[in-house]
Amino acid sequence: MVTLPVDPEFRGWLLLSGKWFCEGEGTLVNHGNDGRAAIVHRSRIGPDFEMFVEFSVTSKPDTGLCCKRCEVIFDWRESGFHNIASYGQDGVSPMRPRITGNYRTTQPKDTLLRLPTDNTTKFPYEKVNTLLLRSLDRKISLTCNGIETFKDYQPENFRSGIPDGHVGIGSQRWCNNNETHISKIQVRRLAANGK
């Protein structure tokens, strides 16, 4: 995989929303601003790729029930269409992975394409968490903290397979006290055989 570098000038990146900072060598930091933040890389990865990120969320003790979610944005275009793979929680909800279709299409906003299980599987939230997204032939696989949560998943009405699509990072915050730290942002294109 190739590391997508991050520097204080955000060279190679396009800031879409939210408050983003660079910390140390190659770490993106998003400060909670009671909304959604997004940043995409200017390289055109295309439809078949793997992307890995490592993230942690820090918060002050008085944050209460907050959203803690890190997102991988893919199939992003200048028109604004994109899809999201995320791992996190909303308030008192358990940690969960999810694939979210583009909220600017005719789909309902934040349509959850849920993991096809009996909903009894528990997903741990660690001090440092990892996301590995694989997109190949319009099938999505997502591994969170080493647990494969989606495998070759083909959501209905999913806008995927864009030849010149970008990838990026998102962070959803409901508390101004939260910070999301994202590092080790790595990506690689996949050939038709998945290698």
Image (cartoon, grey):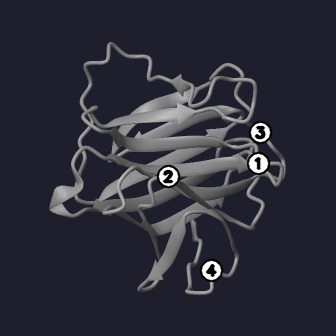
What residue sits right under mark 4 in the picture? 10
Residue at (55, 63) in percent of width and height:
18
Badge 3 marks a residue whose secondary structure is: loop
Evaluate if marks 3 and 4 touch, with contact meaning CB atoms under 8 Å apart. Answer: no
Q: CA distance from mark 2 to mark 4?
A: 21 Å
Q: Is residue 8 left or right of residue 83?
A: left
What residue sits right under mark 3 in the picture? 161
Q: Is 111 located above or below residue 140 in the figure?
A: above
Q: CA distance from mark 3 to mark 4?
A: 27 Å
Q: Residue 41, percent across and down?
A: 68, 66
Q: Residue 96, percent across and down?
A: 35, 34
Badge 1 marks a residue whose secondary structure is: loop
Q: Earlier in the sequence, mark 3 or mark 1?
A: 1
Q: Earlier in the sequence, mark 2 or mark 4?
A: 4
Q: Residue 180, percent across and down?
A: 38, 63
Q: Earlier in the sequence, mark 2 or mark 3?
A: 2
Evaluate if marks 3 and 1 touch, with contact meaning CB atoms under 8 Å apart. Answer: no
What residue sits right under mark 2 in the picture? 35
- Which tag is nearer the camera, tag 3 or tag 1? 1
Q: Earlier in the sequence, mark 1 or mark 4?
A: 4
Q: Is residue 139 left or right of residue 97?
A: right
- Amino acid type of the residue tagged 2 in the rendering: Gly
Residue at (52, 72) in percent of width and height:
20
Q: Is 117 located above or below residue 6 in the figure?
A: above
Evaluate if marks 1 and 4 touch, with contact meaning CB atoms under 8 Å apart. Answer: no
Q: Is 80 located above or below residue 21 in the figure?
A: above
How many numbered marks are there?
4
Q: Earlier in the sequence, mark 3 or mark 4?
A: 4
